[in-house]
Image (tube, rainbow, N blue to C red):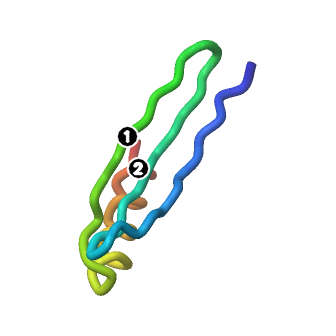
């Protein structure tokens, strides 16, 4: 079975929340991350994308 992953962005006033989900065979993993206020979101997403791409 192929691994599936997703990122869901939610707004819980006043913060943006990211839910990273991964399903691999019979394992389910989830990580919740608080990005910050709306004006901080773009910089944080860019930093996290760069971090994940280095792995």
Please tell me in which quadrant of the rendered image residue 16 appears: bottom left
Front label number (2 vs 1): 1
Left or right: where does residue 51 sit relative to residue 29? left
- Residue at the spot 72% in from the left edge and 25% down from the top edge: 2
Q: Earlier in the sequence, mark 2 or mark 1?
A: 1
For label 2, the residue is 52
Q: Which residue is mark 1?
A: 31
**Residue occupying the far front of the picture:** 13
Furthest toward the top, the residue is: 26
Counting from the top left corner in percent of width and height, residue 46 is at 38, 70
Horizontal and vertical percent position of residue 21? 51, 39
Query: Tags 2 and 1 in contact by the CB under 8 Å rule?
Result: no
Q: Quadrant of the C terminus?
A: top left
Q: CA distance from mark 2 to mark 1?
A: 13 Å
Tell me the quarter of the image containing the N terminus: top right
Can you name the residue that lies furthest to the bottom here?
39
Looking at the image, which residue is at 65% across and 35% down?
4
- Asked if 44 appears above or below 53 in the picture, the reply is below
- The residue positioned 52% from the left and 24% from the top of the image is 28
Label 2: state its secondary structure.
helix
The residue closer to the viewer here, 13 or 55, is 13
- Secondary structure beneath dot 1 equals strand
How many C-alpha atoms fall within 10 Å of the one at disc 2: few (<14), some, or many (≥20)? Answer: few
Left-right relation of 55 to 7: left
Query: Toward which corner of the image does residue 39 lie, by quadrant?
Result: bottom left
Query: As displayed, is residue 7 above or below residue 43?
Result: above
Disc 1 residue crowd, few under 14, some 14–19, many 20+, Cα 10 Å = few
The one nearer the camera, 11 or 9, is 11
- Residue at the image position 29 percent from the left and 70 percent from the top: 15
Residue 51 placement (x, y as % from top left): 34, 54
């Amino acid at each position: 079975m192929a691994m599936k992953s997703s990122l869901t962005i939610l707004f819980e006033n006043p913060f943006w929340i990211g839910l990273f989900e991964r399903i691999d065979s019979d394992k389910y993993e989830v990580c919740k991350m608080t990005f910050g206020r709306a004006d901080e979101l773009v910089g944080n997403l860019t930093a996290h994308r760069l971090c994940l791409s280095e792995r």
